[in-house]
Structure formats: structure tokens, C-alpha cells
Image (cartoon, grey):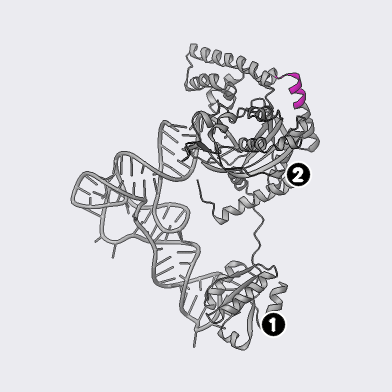
Amino acid sequence: MEDILPALARHYQFVEGQARELFDRYGYGEIRTPVLEPTELFARTVGDSSDIVVSKQMYTFTDPGERSNTMRPEGTAGVVRALIESGLLKETSQQKLFYVGPMFRYEKPQKGRQRQFTQIGMELFGVAHAAADAEVITMCYHLLRRVGFNDIVVKLNNLGDPGDRKGFNDRLREAILEVVASARESGKYAEWCEQWQDLAAINPMRVFDTKVEECRPYLSSLPRVVDYVGEEARNHFDVVTALLAQAGVPFEVDRELVRGLDYYTRTVFEIVQTGLGAQNAILGGGRYDNLVEELGGPPTPAVGMAIGVERLIMAMQAQGIKLPPSPPPAFYVLALDDESLPTAYRLAELARSSGQRVAFDCQPKSAKAGLRSANRSKAQIAVIVGADELSRGVAQWKNLESGEQIELLMAEIERNLKEG
RNA sequence: GUGGGUAUAGUUCAGUCGGUUAGAACGCCAGAUUGUGGAUCUGGAGGUCGUCGGUUCAAGUCCGACUAUCCACCCCA
């Protein structure tokens, strides 16, 4: 958990601002759901085999009413629950939604992984057509382009339908155990074998995610999801890729891409960037056609994705992407003493009322300190009022770039401040 | 959950073998210029040496625990 100080907050504002503009253009509406949800909700959505649930990577507590609550580890579950409870899914055939907010996972922090982090996510409900998958992926691409990335490639894969998955998982489980057994026989049994055995029991597909170099050669002997995907799902995926090509979105089919959340069906995708250490995925998502029904809603196909804002910002910094500079104040209004402060205060407010950006110190300062501060504020003009000016009904108007300073009647000062 | 690193001024970091008053740079404040910024020079303020405990005549320095943080595994955004 970290404090987001103003310099960093600007990055969040920029990214979120770009996202909001983009979502608006595509007709996605914002949804805000509670940070706290019944623990049960995540146990059912995230999946029994996900580490988020299995190794208790959740902030869970019992509230005074003896109910078990959890601070959301991801956004989709809450959105789906809200849609079901509100009946919005019945009202119209489809919903296009986005959310922005903090998520919490009780994991060991490291580069690119905080216990509290921010996700921007979007969900498209009620469309089975492959155009839905394509739209979500296309939007991801454009969001990254908007915030300044140039070389983006979307990695995607097809996990098939639940029936396909089941057959594949069974076959894969056998294959993994065979590989481990043969490694043992040839005396090459190592730590990764144990991991593989565990994964075989819980979620076999995860072995493709491995980062252990020495076991990579064995991966090639394992079956691939794509060979087990049924015709319908295969056609669906072909349409997705065709549409991405139409939209000019660079993509790359990665047959080893799997995802940690259990609820995905058919299309899964992610975008990785360098400069993030071991946690290089800044965005990920996919189709989840069964989740809504599993949570008690009407059968509703859906596609969604989530961006890790912290990772996105880190990747931006690693790529040297600069934010547009924040505009400096037009004026710096300076009171040299207590007597002239009310007049200075009035002048500052006058300019602000006309829409000008004005820096004001809220305390009298010496000319020297005040101008030093004015200089730092990058304001173009300093307006200086002291006892002398006050008694003569004038103020100093100083151009901080040229250094030129003139004395103007108060009425002229007021007119200039209003005009900018 | 596992393994390793780090913690000293606002910030980035020095600090020798354990030894007197813990330093530098940048930043901040002030003066040089009695009411005028940026550049320069001079000065000043600013420290629970992460916390607690231990060893010792003596601890920023050695030991232990805790906390925070970083890196990796795992997993994910």
C-alpha cells in the first residue's frame, strides 16, 4: 500500500481521463460497486483453483454482524452481482460497462504487485457474437495507444468451451504426470516436478505459465488447448482475429497463454510490457459466458478485461512516456503585508471568477520571497500589492519572463486580470 | 506461504576496526540587494540513525525479534 502524492496522482488522472474519454466514445457507462462484498461471492467467481482463493490472498474479516466480508480482489464479480440484483440484465439485452477503483490482494508485495492496486476494467454483457470480443480487445489497444505506447501487441488464445476444456484438462493432466514420471526415471526429478504435480491436480493448464527455465523443454511434449477446441469455438475465434485485423489491431496468437481466473471461456488475451520486473502483464481479460448464470443470473454471454493502473504507469515511465505538462497559473498574486492582503485576496478571486488559474499564497511575503515563489510557480505575471500601492490605489504588474514591471491603476489591473 | 536484500536530514546517499558534537549533494529558509524572482556567493534550519530488546565501559555500526520496503519464487493487474 502506498500513498499517491500529487506528482504521481497526475499519472492516475491522465490514465483514467484517457480511459473515460475512450469508454464514452464506445458507449460504455460507469458502474461503481462496493469495495466490500460477501466472501462467498469471490469464492464462487474467482474459482476454486485460483490462488486468490486457495491460498487466501484476500482481505477477509468477520463484521460485527457475524458476516464474512472480503475486500474485492478483482472487479468482475461485484459488477455481475450488481447487474443480477438490479435486474438490469433483464431490462435490456446488453450492457456495456466500465469501472475504476482499488482492488486488494493479500500477497507478498514486489515490483508491479501491491496489496492495494487500481484497476480500470470493462465488461460487455449479453453479446455472444465474436464482435464483442473484438471490441473489448480493440479498446484495450486504443487505450494503450492513447496513453503513449507505440509498439503494442495483443497476445490472445482460445480456451474453447467448458466441454472442450474438460477433455483437454483430463488429457493434459495425464500428460503432465507422464512427463514427471519420465523425468523421475531419467534421474532429472527436480523441484518443478513437484509444482507440476500440484498443478495437475488443481489446474493443469497453468503449467504453461511456468517461469522455470529447465522445465520449458518438456512443455513441447504436452498437448495444446487449440487441438481440443470444438468447431463452434474455433470459428468464433477466427472471427475475432478477422475483426481485429479489420480494425488494424496488432495481435499474436499465443497457444501457451492461459489465465489465472477460472471463469474464462473461448477468447483470452493479455498485453505485456517491459520495465515491470517479473510482473509484466499490464492488462488481461477474456470471454466468460457462464459466470453470470453461475451467480444466479439469466444465461448471459460476456467479455471483460482489466488494466492494472500502477503497472501501466510503471511501464509508461520505463518507456519514457511523458505526461502533457500541467498548465502553470496565469497570475501570481502577492501581498507584501497584512494591510494589503485583503486587496490582493480580492484580486485573486476576481481573476479566478473569470476562469483564470491564479496562485495566491494566503499569507503576506517579502517581495523577495514572494517573487521567488512566483518564479517557481511558473506564472507569467506577478501582481504585487503593498502598503505603498494600497495608499495610491495602484498595483505592480510584473512580467516574470521579461522582468518588465509597470505600475497600473487598480481598475486597469482588474481589467487585465479578468481578461487573462 | 517460501527465499534473499535494504531501512541514516524533505530527497538521493556517505559514515572506516564499535570510540568524543552523525556528514555531503540537491531541496528548503535567510542574507549579500532597508520592497523585487531566475545566476552567483555566504550563512542557517532540519535527525527518535525504522521500532523494541540484547551484547558492551561505549552501538548508526554487532546480535535477535518485529515493522516497512524492495527483489525473486508462487500468482496476478
The residue type indicated by label 1 comes to Ala
Q: Which of the 4 image quadrants contains residue A385? A: bottom right
Q: Are marks 1 and 2 in contact (CB under 8 Å)?
A: no
- For label 2, the SS is loop
Which x, y percent locates residue B48?
A: 34, 56
The chain identifier of the residue carrying mark 2 reads: A
Q: Are marks 1 and 2 on the same chain?
A: yes
The residue that mark 2 highlights is A27
Which x, y percent locates residue A214?
A: 53, 23
The residue that mark 1 highlights is A411
Most extreme residue toward the top is A185
- For label 1, the SS is helix
Which x, y percent locates residue A401?
A: 65, 72
Instruction: Tell me if I can see residue A18 in this picture.
Output: yes
Write the start and end of the magenta stretch as one range: A229-236
Q: Earlier in the sequence, mark 1 or mark 2?
A: 2
Crowding around mark 1 (Cα neighbors within 10 Å: few <14, some 14 to 19, many 20+) is few
